[in-house]
Amino acid sequence: MGQDPGQDRATVEGQASPEELRRDISQTREQLGETAAALAEKTDVKAQAKAKVEDLKQAAAEKADSLKRAGAEKAESVKQAASEKGSATPGTGNVQSAGSGLMARASAVAAQARTMARESPVATAAGAAFIGGVLVGRRRSR
C-alpha cells in the first residue's frame, strides 16, 4: 500500500526496461503536475473570492430583473384594478379622479423601484430574498 505499481512489476519481472521506466516517470510527472495545479487552485483565495463575487453579481442581477418584472406586473394590475373601479360607478367623478391618481402613484412607485434596482442590485436582491422568505413562511404556516 502506498507504493507505485510500477515498483511491484519491476521486482516481479526482475528489472524494468528503460522505456518502461521513462513511461512511468512521465506518467508520474503528469499526475504530479495535475495535483500541484489542483492544490494551487484550491489555495488561491483571491481567485475564489472573485469567482464568488461574480456569482453573487449574476444572481443579484437576475433577481433585480425578476423584481422589475414583478413590479411592472403589479403596477399594471393596480392600474387595471383602479381603472375598473373607476368605471364601475359611473357618474362619480371622485372615484374616477381617485383611480387616475392611484394609477399615477402606481406608475411613480414602479419607476422608483426600477431606479432603485438599477442603482443597487445587491440591496434589491437582498430585499427580494427577505420578502420571499416572509411570503414562504406565511404560506407554510397556513
Image (cartoon, rainbow, N blue to C red):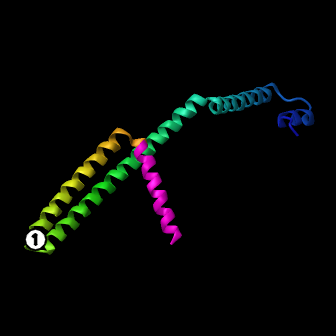
Tell me: residue 20, above or below residue 76.
above
Q: Identify the residue at image location x=44%, y=56%.
A: 131
Local SS, label 1: loop
Along the horizontal axis of the image, is 84 left or right of 113? left
Q: Position of residue 138 (x, y in %)?
A: 48, 65
Q: Position of residue 23 (x, y in %)?
A: 74, 29
Check residue 91 for magenta coloring: no
The residue to which callout 1 is attached is 92
Q: Residue furthest left?
A: 91
Q: Quadrant of the N terminus?
A: top right
Q: Amino acid at mark 1?
A: Thr
**Mark 1 neighbour class, 10 Å CA radius: few under 14, some 14 to 19, many 20 or more:** few
Q: Between residues 95 and 21, which one lies in front from this camera angle?
A: 95
Check residue 133 for magenta coloring: yes
Tell me: residue 116, above or below residue 79.
above
Tell me: residue 142, above or below residue 26.
below
The residue stretch that appears in magenta: 123-142
Q: Position of residue 26 (x, y in %)?
A: 72, 27
Magenta stretch secondary structure, dominant: helix
Q: Identify the residue at image location x=35%, y=49%.
A: 65
Q: Quadrant of residue 27?
A: top right
Tell me: residue 14, above or below residue 79.
above
